[in-house]
Every structure is written in C-alpha cells, then in structure tokens.
Image (cartoon, grey):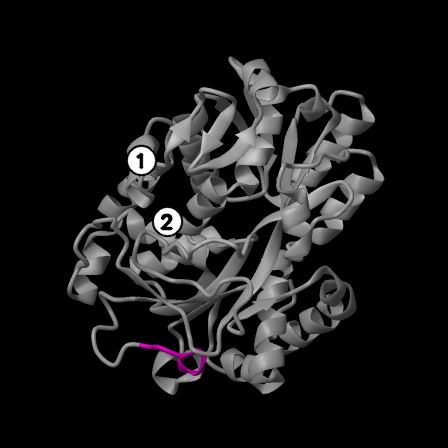
Amino acid sequence: MITRTRRITRAAGALVAVTALAVTLTACGQEGGGKDEQARELLPPSDVDTSNGLVIDGELVADKALWDAAQGGVVKLYSGTGKEAEDLTAARFKQETGLDIELTRLPTNKLAERVLSEQGAGKLGADIARVTDPRVASEFAEQGVFVSYTTPFDELLREQNTGVRDTYLNCYYFVNAMGYNDAIIEENQPTQWEDLIDPKYAGKLGVVAVTTGGTLNALAHFQIDTLGREFLQQQGRQNPRIFDSTSTEVDALARGEISIASLSFNNAFAAELAGAPIELVIPDKGVSASENLMGMTANGLENPAAQVFMNWTMSKSGQGFAASQGFVPARTDMEPVKAGGKYQLPQADSPQFHLFTEEQYNEFAARDEEWWKQAFNYMG
C-alpha cells in the first residue's frame, strides 16, 4: 500500500505548504521523477515468463514470433489521457516487457487536430492513439486513422461487452467521484453526493465545466439521471468556482482554495499520492464513468512493439495496473484491484457504476450541457 506524506492537520498549515506541494507535484511529473519505483509500489510485480513468447501471470500476451520481432522496438503513443497516468503506464510496461514508449500527450481536442493534420499530410507519427471523446474516436475511424487490429482477448472482450468496435476499443474507464481537502474539513467529513449542496460549503465548492470534454458530459448526465436536474441547480446556487480543466481544479483543492469538489478520480488520486491533503469519496449512489478509447494506426500494424502494447493493455496485467491508478478496467473477469491499495472503485458490472455510453452521448450530451450551463449560469 502506498505511503503518502502525512496530511497537514489544519487549514492554515495546508496553505503554508502550497509552495512545497507544487514542487512535489512538478517533480512527480518530470522525466525520471521516480515513476519506476512508484509503479512498483502501486501494484506488486507480475510473474513474467519470456521463454516462449510473453506470458504474464499465466496469460499469453504475445506469441514467440511477435515477441521476438518486438525486441528493441519503441511504441509511439499519442494520448489524451493525463501525462501522470501515461508515464506510470510506460514505466510498468517497460518493467514487464523491456520495451519503451515515446509519449505525445495533448488534450483530446488538440490531439485530434494534430492527428488529422498529420494523417492528411501522410505523416502520421502515432502507432497507437488514445482519446477521451467518442466523437473523436469515430472520426479517427472514418478518416482511416484507426485500422483493424485484434488482440488475443478479442472474443472475451466482446463477450463481456467492453466496448470493442471494428477499428478501436475501450481500454478502461475514466471515473468521476468526489473529494475534499482533509486539512480543512477535519470533522463531519463528506460521504455522499448530497454533501456538495450542503450550505456550509457555499463558496467552497469546485466543479469543472461540462464543456471540458466527454468525462464531464458523463458526470453531468449521471447527476441529472441519478440525483435530478434540481441537483445541478442547487450546486449552481452554492456560488461554486468553475474550472476549465481537471488539473487546475485538483491543484486548487490541494491548495485549499476550495474545500470540496466533484472530480476526476485518477487525477485527484495522483495528487494524493504526491502528498496533497486530498481524501477521495466513492458515494453509495455510485460514480459516473466514460470510455477511454484506443486504436491502432497503420504505423502500429508495422510495429511489433505497438502490437505488444495493445495486447498488454487488454491483458489482466495491464488492466490491473490501470485499476491501481484509479481507473476501472474494461475487463470484468479479474479480481478487483484497489487504487493504491486504498480505494475500491465499483467495477464495470456493478450497479454503482454508471457508464455514459456512446449512444447516450449522442442522445443526451447536448441537452445535458445546456441544462448544466443554465444551472451554473455559465457562458463558456
């Protein structure tokens, strides 16, 4: 289980520690900032056997021909997932395979612009791309960015309804839940979604604008569907601080500029690991979830290392490591893995897991966004 810097016990202490915390968070994001060690701490090492291909914890990830061809290769990954998560994933992948990942990380909307521009010029640099918006994934498929590739787990993934399409798949789920600064809220700590609208948190609530992307569309729909449209309006009356990105919201929570928030579980968990006085909450009514969509490019089909990475991502080992970082695995045929050995998120087959499907996205996203903007008097 991860050990983290002992929480600061008073709000004043939290504010004094802002500079030190900022340095810690920056160091954790730097190349060589302890990712290898942190990846090992998040989840115990797997049993890797390379005597006849790549077998991890008894599961065949790559046959001998593919494994031999992949040696010395580098995976060029373009991703809209957070850099902290991808750096840890790259560290774990190298530990288990010896293969490197060259990461290009951009927000999904910026990533889409770059990928489509490179594709149009015939100079696409990615072997594999991950995006957080189903509309972008669909466009990548239509424009020929994504090509068909089948992992060794394809039949199983389809049986489990994990989100396999013709040319891309859902590799794991993003989750939005709650969190609070436990250096500020030391007593009567929040446990349920309804705590966000408690009058004592007026002016202290943080939210991320629904226009930020697919994960926030999922959160808005979950809150409307589970708690009612009035719940949005009640949050709006809390005089909340509205952020244009998850990272800035989490930083503000760590600094004590807000004391409670709805937030991206993985991003906030990464900050907690770095020493931020943040405690996460998984309410009884569940969490919102959205897909992380991943596809192979024509370049990747020619790169055995990229094929190994695609396979590894959908293996129990890759799925378990995603869970250890605060994501929910796409696969449901494995034992639950706690994030950092501490938090157990609902699994994809749990009634507490509220997935915003691609079909729901197409039907409800525009309506939900309009309702959210009205509730928060937001013009962005």
Query: Where on the picture, by quarter, is residue 343?
Result: bottom left
Callout in the foreground (2, 1): 2
Q: The disc labelled 1 sits on which kind of residue?
A: Ala
Q: Secondary structure at mark 1?
A: helix
Q: Is residue 119 above or below residue 176?
A: above
Residue 2 in view in this figure: yes
Give me the disc on residue 27: 1
Viewer-side residue, 241 vs 259: 259
Q: The disc labelled 2 sits on which kind of residue?
A: Ala
Q: CA distance from mark 2 to mark 1?
A: 13 Å
Magenta span includes 37: no
Q: Secondary structure at mark 2?
A: helix
Q: Which residues are magenta?
A: 190-195
**Can you give x and y, in whole percent of width and height, for residue 135 in the image?**
75, 51
Q: Is residue 204 above or below residue 46?
A: below
Residue shown at 48% from the left, 41% from the top: 318
Mark with earlier residue (2, 1)? 1
Q: Which residue is mark 2?
A: 270
**Can you give x and y, in whole percent of width and height, for residue 200 in the image?**
34, 83
Determine crowd level at label 1: few under 14, some 14-19, many 20+ residues with C-alpha closer than 10 A.
some
